[in-house]
């Protein structure tokens, strides 16, 4: 990933993704990276999903829309990553 300039910085949200056979397919963790100068807690509170919720494809779109709404700029990246030990995203 290239360097993010401070004026371009919005937020990077990473959902760790589960890929095991016994996957529960839930939101396992919600992490923020590169959010200096941004109120990550306000974004977290505004997200329409939380840790433990069932994972659905629209979560990535919802995360992008929430960052745009709260921060006023698009997120630099939003990804669902694999895997935690419980098989959650």
Image: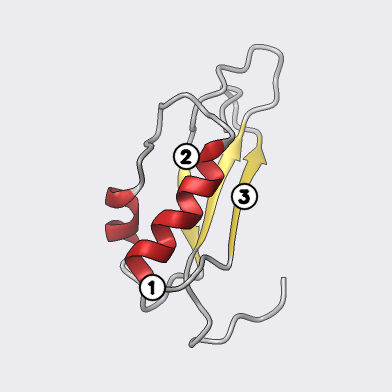
| Residue under the image location 65 percent in, 42 percent down | 81
Label 3: how many Cα within 10 Å (few below 14, some 14–19, many 20+): some
| Residue under the image location 35 percent in, 47 percent down | 47
- Hey, which residue is sitting farthest top in the picture? 22
Seen from the viewer's position, the closer of residues 78 and 62 is 62
> Mark 3 falls on what kind of element?
strand
> Mark 2 falls on what kind of element?
loop
Label 2: how many Cα within 10 Å (few below 14, some 14–19, many 20+): some
Q: Are marks 2 and 1 in contact (CB under 8 Å)?
A: no
Query: What whole-number distance in Å separates the C-alpha atoms at marks 2 and 1?
Result: 24 Å
User: Viewer-nearest of labels 3 and 1?
Assistant: 1
User: Residue 72 appears at what percent x and percent y?
Assistant: 38, 73
- Which residue, given by chain and number where applicable, does mark 3 sit on? 79
User: Residue 22 appears at what percent x and percent y?
Assistant: 64, 12
Seen from the viewer's position, the closer of residues 29 and 76 is 76
- Which residue, given by chain and number where applicable, does mark 1 sit on? 72
- Which residue, given by chain and number where applicable, does mark 2 sit on? 29
Which callout, 2 or 3, points at the residue further toward the start of the chain? 2
């Amino acid at each position: 990933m290239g360097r993010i300039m401070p004026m371009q910085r919005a937020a990077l949200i990473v959902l760790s993704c589960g890929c095991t056979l016994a996957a529960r397919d839930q939101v396992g963790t919600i992490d923020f990276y590169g959010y200096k100068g941004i109120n990550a807690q306000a974004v977290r509170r505004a997200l329409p999903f939380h840790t433990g919720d069932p994972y659905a494809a629209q979560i990535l779109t919802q995360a992008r829309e929430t960052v745009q709404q709260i921060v006023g700029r698009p997120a630099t990246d939003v990804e669902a990553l694999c895997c935690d030990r419980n098989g959650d995203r």
